[in-house]
Image (spheres, rainbow, N blue to C red):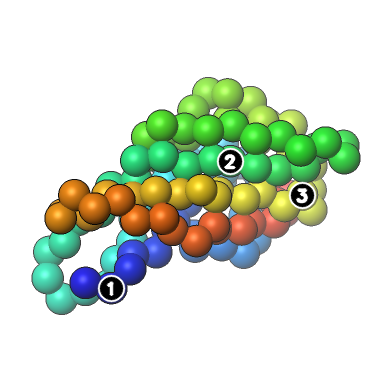
Amino acid sequence: VPDPAIAVAGKKGGNITKQELLDASDVVVVIDFDFDVSFDVVEFNLMTLIDGFVYEQKSNSNIITEKQKEIIAKIKDGTPVYFQDIKCKGPDGFVRKMPPVAFRVTE
């Protein structure tokens, strides 16, 4: 089974609007495989820079938390946002560490 990819608001990285991030409810696993295989995100960390300060907030599920949304609401145009320390559980019960997903906020 190949490693899955991670998506937020249907995107796997690149440019994203602040509103798309605010409207997103979760971090999901995307996998292109011929068989029905499911993976679930079990935790991730949101990290960004606001006015020169690093803001980080962890979620212990696939849900983007209210505290994470509060951070997103403060983000300005051009700000990088990282979903990192992502862990997902496969059908075998094994937890995989996933690479970070990077976005740049555009208005």
The outermost residue toward the right is 52
Q: Residue furthest left?
A: 35
Find residue 47 and report its horizontal and vertical position in percent: 65, 42
Q: Residue at x 72, y 52 (%)?
A: 80
- What residue is at 62 percent from the left and 50 percent from the top? 82
Q: Nearer the viewer, residue 18 or 97?
A: 97
Residue in the image at 87% along x and 40% along y: 52
- Residue 62's quadrant in the figure? top left
Give the residue type that dot 3 points to: Thr
- Real-space Cα separation, disc 2 to disc 3, in angstroms: 13 Å
- Asked whether 64 or 1 is in front, the reply is 1
**Residue beneath label 2, please?**
46
Q: As shown in the figure, which amino acid type bears the numbered disc 2?
A: Leu
Disc 1, SS: loop
- Secondary structure type for disc 2: strand
Which residue lies under the disc numbered 1?
2
N-term-proximal mark, 2 vs 1: 1
Nearest to viewer (mark 3 / mark 1): 1
> From mark 2 to mark 1, how far is it between C-alphas?
25 Å
In the image: residue 7, left or right of residue 55 = left
- Circles 2 and 3: CB atoms closer than 8 Å: no
Kindly identify the amino acid type of the residue bearing the numbered disc 1. Answer: Pro
